[in-house]
Image: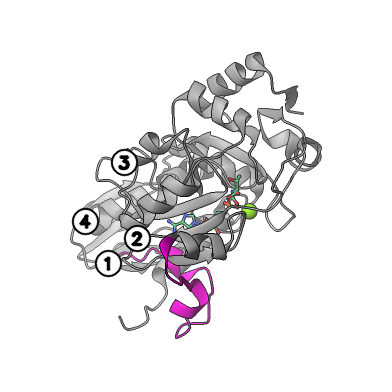
Amino acid sequence: MARLLAADDEAIATGARLLREGGLVVFPTETVYGLGADATNATAVARIFEAKRRPRLNPLIVHVADREAAGRLVVLNDAGGALAQAFWPGPLTLVAPRRPDCPVAALVSAGLDTLAVRVPAHPLAHALLEACAVPVAAPSANPSGRLSPTRARHVAEALGDAVDLILDGGPTEVGIESTIVDCSAPDPVLLRAGGVSRAMIETLLGARIADHSARHAERPSAPGQLASHYAPRARLRLAASEVRPGEALLAFGPDLPAGAGAAVMTLNLSETGDLRAAAANLFDMLHRLDASGAAAIAVMAIPKSGLGEAINDRLARAAAPRPAA
Ligand code: TXA
Ligand code: MG
């Protein structure tokens, strides 16, 4: 079982050290408890998906101590800047383009060129973020498909074995997740209702804001998922047992398929067949293989157990026929 510590100064220092060492630390925010890992450490982030048993590698929210720290990760446009000024720290998450030098692992934003960032108001979350001095990726600390936790006890019961430390800050105040506003285009879009109401946002901006379902009404098949769909330019050929001329290879495990020697470029998700390493490498390697200019990427079969389910889900999405742009 993970240690459950009342969140005093010493516990926060321990949590900060564990985060910097690649550990998983559960911490209270004013909305719900978060399951945190160092966002710049892809292997630590892969452990989040493993612990939650997420069937999909959805993008995660990155938590930072203040607006300056957020500004080192993303570029906020006018609306984003106004929302940050008004509601940070607080239960608001902003989606914005990653800065070119953004140190956050590609896995956190599931390969997208945007990042969801928030500055929590909870004093313990703030103290932890200051102390660890790295951006912290954290989804709600519940197993996938279950209710978000508002008490440390909920987390201990459901995820206790999978995390390194639980910081107990008592019941959370807001109890529902943060509001998510996408500011990556000139007109902001409400992606998720939450702790800051639509009315508060519209009053501040002096304009109505569209919600996600309106913008994507023409493609209703996968609400919430289209925005997080990373599609490489190159075609993906899954479960490939040979590499064809002109293809790049995304390998897995020690044994390469026939034709691998002639691949345009080869990257191995994990030479030892470790699924955590594979998840950590997935989006970064897809980007690099795509940049090789190969028309297609042959992807070796990945086992479906454990994190393999989420990896296969993402690969299937990236390989799916694309709607005409
Ligand atoms: O209150 C909260 O927001 C809590 C606490 C722990 O901060 N966190 C939380 O995280 O609810 P999570 O992972 O359960 O929800 C993250 C949501 C997902 O629905 C995801 O699709 C969206 O944020 N998201 C993350 N990055 C995104 C991006 N780049 N573009 C669009 N949506 C994104
Ligand atoms: Mg959640």
Residue 280, x across and y down, in percent = 45, 43
Q: Does the residue tagged 1 have its C-beta within 8 Å of any atom of ligand 1?
A: no
Asked if residue 13 is among those painted magenta in the image, a careful observer would answer no
What residue is disc 2 on? Answer: 184
Task: Specify the farthest residue to the top.
Answer: 10
Distance of label 1 from label 2 (alpha carbons): 24 Å
Residue at numbered disc 4: 291
Q: Are marks 3 and 4 in contact (CB under 8 Å)?
A: no
| Pair 1/2: label in front | 2
The residue lying toward the viewer, choosing from 68 and 21, is 68
Magenta range is 205-232
Helix or strand or loop: what does disc 4 sit on? helix
Q: Earlier in the sequence, mark 1 or mark 4?
A: 1
Q: Nearer the viewer, residue 53 or 62?
A: 62
Task: Give amino acid for label 4.
Answer: Ala
Residue at 31%, 56% in the rendered image: 78
Label 3 secondary element? loop
Who comes first in sequence, dot 1 or dot 2? 2
**Most common secondary structure along the magenta stretch:** loop
CA gap, disc 1 and disc 4: 9 Å
Q: Which residue is mark 3?
A: 102
Residue type for callout 1 = Ala
Element type where label 2 sits in the image? loop
Taking 168 as reference, is 310 above or below it?
Answer: below
Whichever of callouts 3 and 4 sits on the residue coming sooner in the sequence is 3
Q: Which residue is mark 1?
A: 234
Percent position of residue 302, x then y: 50, 55
